[in-house]
Image (cartoon, rainbow, N blue to C red):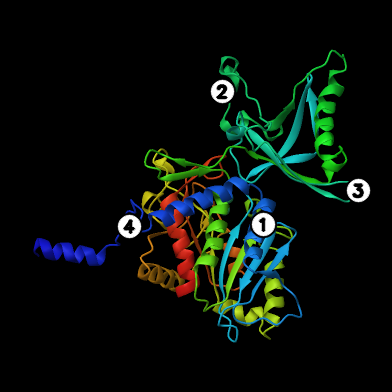
Amino acid sequence: MTEKNLKELKKKLFIDRKKYVRVPVGSETRYEDLIKEYIKFIGEAKTERETIEKILKTITNNGFEEFQKDKKYSSGSKLYFVNGNKSMIVVLVGDDFENFNLRIIASHVDSPHLDLKLNPVDEKSGFGYLKTHYYGGIKKYQWLTIPLALHGVVCRKDGTEIKINIGEKSEDICFCISDLLPHLAREQMNKTVTKFIDGESLTVLSSGAQSNSEEYQMDAKFNILSAIYDKFGITEHDLQCAELQFVPNFKPQIVGFDKFGIGGYGQDDRVCAFASLKALSLAKEINHTRVLYFADKEETGSDGTTGARSSFFRDSMAKFLNQFKATCDEVFPKSICLSGDVDAAFDPMYPEFYDKLNSAHLGQGVAITKYTGYGGKFGGSDASAELVSLITKKFSNSNIIYQVTGGLGKVDTGGGGTVAKYLANLNIPTIDVGVPVLSMHSPFEITSGLDLFELVRAYTCFYTNI
Ligand code: MN
Ligand code: MN
């Protein structure tokens, strides 16, 4: 075999693993604008409620209206369902309304954080603290000594609901969890990381001013409660009727000399929520009916009314389909769902935990994950070969850079899942399509700008060409 023939044969046999090293020529401005818009989005939407509020604002500005039972819908109709301000479904009716073939993108809008406890105000030696209960899978030590902001809602006794957002602006106050200085940490440093800090120690320093009074205890609690009362009219009782969470207060920012990355909190999974919303507006021709599902509680197992296991999705779709005398049972199996969630990016600093060949790599395009789960593929979702074939073929035709992976890290090192299985359990053919994330679930996650660019193109392709 000649060298030329060998080269050609290899080209035919091997996957063309294009490394995506630069923005396509002619797309520079579009790229820059997208990154700017994304950074603004994740900088402003740091909780599930804030994300839903932002999405709601965007879509109502674009003519979407809340579903009405008696309204006649047809091609081009724009509607949405919202659930408890924490999850929602957006529908853009397509030309397929006589024979539905839905194109669904499902992502989640919650991220790991520290929830305020219901009796949070505590004092120690004159300092005031707010006690927390962590939400989602975190490495607790990552939350020490970083500036925190407090976000959420409080339902006051008088029936009004107050939105709280303290600690985001540079002139604003912020909060912090202290840590022991290294000089005195000999014993602490000998502990394993899981024992290094226990859940109860994720207690946030929130006041420190001390008076001449000997009643320090009263002062610490008073300093916290009087400050929030002065500002928001909230009492200790109201804190029990609240959803308040501490999140990192820093702003998302471009990472690296070559500007390859976007660093910021909560990119799992607001990156996919953002990309799907973007694709909804970018995909011009409406052939299939487009559905966006934004779920809450993914990080704690998708339970509850706003989680993906709730009947909200099926019930809402049933109401919608009923307007057309169609049913979920007949429509779902013909439809396709992309579960938009992030994948673990291969970390060159920790190669021993990954199967390099089967991991998603930052900057190498959209991650198509055929299956998730842990151990012997337990608890995950597994897309069919036919669906992988269809998606990869269409993405290839649109020159979308993608990588096909499975699982999370090396077999038996751990694992994880997404909302994919809950949609798949409804008999909707579902596959995970998202982007790789470095330092996932940390206060400062890193994605690649180019992967995000490709993800928006991939979702747009899904809505337009699949
Ligand atoms: Mn996720
Ligand atoms: Mn997650």
Q: Earlier in the sequence, mark 2 or mark 3?
A: 3
Q: Secondary structure at mark 1?
A: helix
Q: Is residue 296 visible?
A: no
Q: Give the left or right position of residue 12, taking residue 335 as reference.
A: left
Q: Residue furthest right?
A: 158
- Identify residue for label 3: 158
**In terms of secondary structure, where does tag 2 sit?**
helix
Numbered badge on residue 189: 2
| Residue 458: % across, % down | 45, 64
The residue that disc 1 covers is 52
Q: Earlier in the sequence, mark 3 or mark 4?
A: 4
Q: Quadrant of the N terminus?
A: bottom left
Q: Is mark 3 within 8 Å of ligand 2?
A: no
Which amino acid type corresponds to the residue marked 4 in the rendered image? Answer: Val
CB atoms at circles 1 and 4 under 8 Å apart? no
Cα gap from disc 2 to disc 3, whole angstroms: 49 Å
Q: Which mark is residue 25?
A: 4
Whichever of callouts 1 and 4 sits on the residue coming sooner in the sequence is 4
